[in-house]
Image (tube, grey):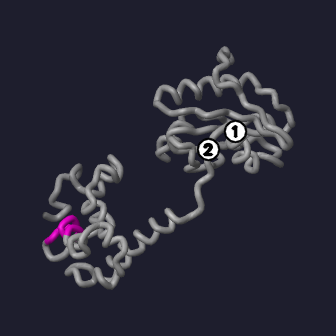
């Protein structure tokens, strides 16, 4: 059956986008990579033939692209695409180990280089997996000399979009003060509540200056500013 003959919610690409790669079988993931079938056979059927030709998924991962050309419907473009995908996986697995956050000092060490030496406040987020390995670190907002936006909803959305389980945030005080403002305390309280609501672990909120850093206690209750 051709992929286009399937209901939209059953097509591999649409299911991948809706539910993630874990929801698809090996042949369906390969079908997404191949993109199309051959002579009346859909991409899923072609993917099944490719896997069977190699023996199993492990052998396919190690196969020379020229070996795949023996499968009807697999030309140089498809063979190269499959080989390239598996090579990318191997490079990712053999690359340098991701930084890991096991405490507040680790978060400070990762965020400080992004926040020091600036004349305007900046908010940085660090997203981690459930073992503390850093998935992403990025500047989220940048404001004026004594303030920067603190978008709680955008922070939570960023963590969820990256597939994170834990996260921390930090912002700088160009004035050199380590004292959190009432707005800093209120934002920390809101973010703590929002993270708990969606099942994320909020690690810390730090204030960074050019020479030092300070943790804003997450458990400190504060009144909302008027």
Q: Quadrant of the C terminus?
A: top right
Give yes or no for contact between labels 1 and 2 (Cβ–Cβ under 8 Å).
yes
Q: Position of residue 124 (x, y in %)?
A: 67, 43
10 Å crowding of disc 1: few (<14), some (14-19), many (20+): many
Q: Which residue is mark 1?
A: 170
Q: Is residue 144 above or below residue 16?
A: above
Q: Main secondary structure of the magenta part?
A: helix
**Splitting the image into 4 quarters, where does residue 171 fall?**
top right
- Residue 158 visible to the viewer: no
Instruction: Using residue 177 as the reference point, say whether residue 72 is left or right of it.
Output: left
**Sequence-first disc among 1 and 2:** 2
Q: Is residue 53 above or below residue 20?
A: below
Residue 44 in the magenta stretch? The answer is yes
Q: Position of residue 193 (x, y in %)?
A: 55, 24
Q: Is residue 148 above or below residue 43?
A: above
Q: Which residue is mark 2?
A: 126
For image coordinates 23% across by 49% down, the residue present is 9
Q: Position of residue 55 (x, y in %)?
A: 24, 72
SS for callout 2: strand
User: From which residue to which does the magenta span run?
Assistant: 41-48
Q: Is residue 225 above or below residue 7?
A: above
- Residue 132 visible to the viewer: yes
């Amino acid at each position: 059956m051709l992929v286009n003959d399937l209901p939209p919610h059953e097509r591999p690409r649409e299911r991948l986008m809706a539910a993630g790669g874990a929801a698809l079988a090996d042949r369906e993931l390969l079908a997404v990579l191949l993109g199309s079938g051959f002579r009346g056979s859909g991409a899923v059927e072609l993917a099944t033939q490719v896997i069977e030709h190699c023996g199993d998924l492990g052998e396919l991962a190690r196969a020379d692209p020229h070996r795949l050309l023996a499968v009807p419907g697999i030309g140089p473009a498809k063979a190269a695409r499959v080989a390239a995908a598996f090579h990318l996986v191997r490079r990712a697995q053999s690359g340098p180990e991701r930084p890991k956050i096991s405490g507040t000092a680790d978060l400070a060490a990762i965020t400080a280089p992004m926040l020091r030496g600036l004349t305007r406040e900046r908010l940085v987020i660090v997203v981690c997996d459930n073992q503390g390995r850093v998935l992403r670190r990025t500047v989220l907002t940048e404001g004026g000399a004594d303030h920067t936006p603190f978008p709680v909803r955008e922070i939570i959305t960023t963590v969820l979009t990256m597939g994170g389980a834990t996260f921390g945030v930090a912002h700088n005080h160009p004035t050199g003060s380590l004292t959190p403002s009432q707005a800093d305390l209120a934002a920390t309280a809101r973010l703590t509540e929002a993270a708990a609501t969606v099942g994320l672990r909020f690690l810390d909120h730090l204030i960074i200056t050019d020479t030092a850093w300070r943790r804003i206690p997450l458990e400190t209750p504060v009144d909302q500013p008027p």
